[in-house]
Each structure stands twice: as C-alpha cells, then as structure tokens.
Image (cartoon, grey):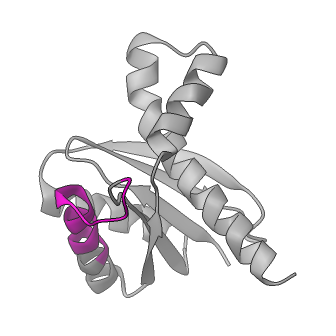
Amino acid sequence: MRIMSVDYGDARTGIAVSDPAEFMASPVAVIKETIFEETIKKAAVFAKDYSVEQIVVGYPKNMNGTIGVRAEKSQLFAQELEAITGVTVKLWDERCTTMSAAVYMNATDTRGKKRKNTIDAAAATIILQDYLDYKRNMHL
C-alpha cells in the first residue's frame, strides 16, 4: 500500500510518499500556502494523485511530550484531511525531524533558497521513513 506523509506548516507543507512495498519514503513536493483550508485541499490532491491508502501527519509535540499550539494545529489538519479524503490519517511524533532534515541539508551542502524550498519535503520524508521503519519492525 502507498502511504503519504505531511509535514504541516503555516507557510510551507512538505509531502512525501512511500513506494507500494512500504520500504522507502521519497519527497514529492512542498505546498507553499498560508491558508489552512487551501493547504488541506492541496494535500488531498496529492493523496488522490498518488492513490494513497494511508496518510501520516507529523505531530510536533513539545520536547517534554506536552501538546502545544503547533501540535493542536496538526491534529486539526489531520482530522480535516481525513474528512476530505476518506483516507485513514495517523498522527506521528515528529520531534526533531526538522532538525534532522537541517543536518541532512548541511551534509549535502544545500544552502539558501534551495534549502528553504526543500527542507519541508525532507522533513516529511524523514517522518514517513520513521513510520515505515516502525511498521516493518513491528512485524519482526
């Protein structure tokens, strides 16, 4: 089954999709949108275009595990996306994924405008790969 992940942000939202074997996550796009409802609609188009059967939305809990404003927005985003697509949406703890994406960008010497345009897709890819690895390890 193909799974999509979303790294929701107020201005940029990263999208990644798995291969049908659920082995590898790949970056797909960054949605540049500041209107919440429009971001959901655009994410739903990707879900349809890639025929995904599950969606994982990054859940940015605070480092101490509490739920802050960002996590609440992600919860609402996940609920609305599930309602509009009819696809099951799971929240996935994404603490430190943007930091991991930044480390990756540094390692690949991605700077400036290109970095800004790709870091969210990289974060979505990390979220999805973490989820795929977790799923695979649960079956061992």
The residue that appears at 49% across and 62% down in the rendered structure is 5
Q: Is residue 72 left or right of residue 5?
A: left
Q: Is residue 85 above or below residue 28?
A: below
Provide residue 121's location: percent of width, then percent of height. 48, 42
Residue 19 percent across, percent down from the top left = 71, 63
Comparing 22 with 123, the one in front is 123
Q: Tell me if residue 70 comes above or below residue 77 in the rendering.
A: above
Magenta stretch prevailing secondary structure: helix
Tell me where residue 131 sits by quadrant. Answer: bottom right
| Residue 81 or residue 126, whichever sits in front | 126
Asked if residue 45 is positioned above or below residue 126 in the image, the reply reads below
User: Going by the picture, which residue comes out furthest to the front?
Assistant: 64
Residue 1 part of the magenta segment? no
Number of marks present in the image shown: 0
* Residue at image location 55% in from the left, 16% down from the top: 110
Answer above or below: position of 25 versus 33: below
Instruction: Give coordinates of residue 133: x percent, y percent.
Output: 73, 65
Residue, x 59% and y 70% (percent of image)?
A: 3
4 relative position to 34: left or right: right
Measured as percent of width and height from the top left, residue 15 is found at 46, 52
* Left or right: 16, with 42 as reference point: right
Q: Quadrant of the C terminus?
A: bottom right
The stretch in magenta equals: 63-78
Image quarter where the N terminus lies is: bottom right
* Quadrant of res 24: bottom right
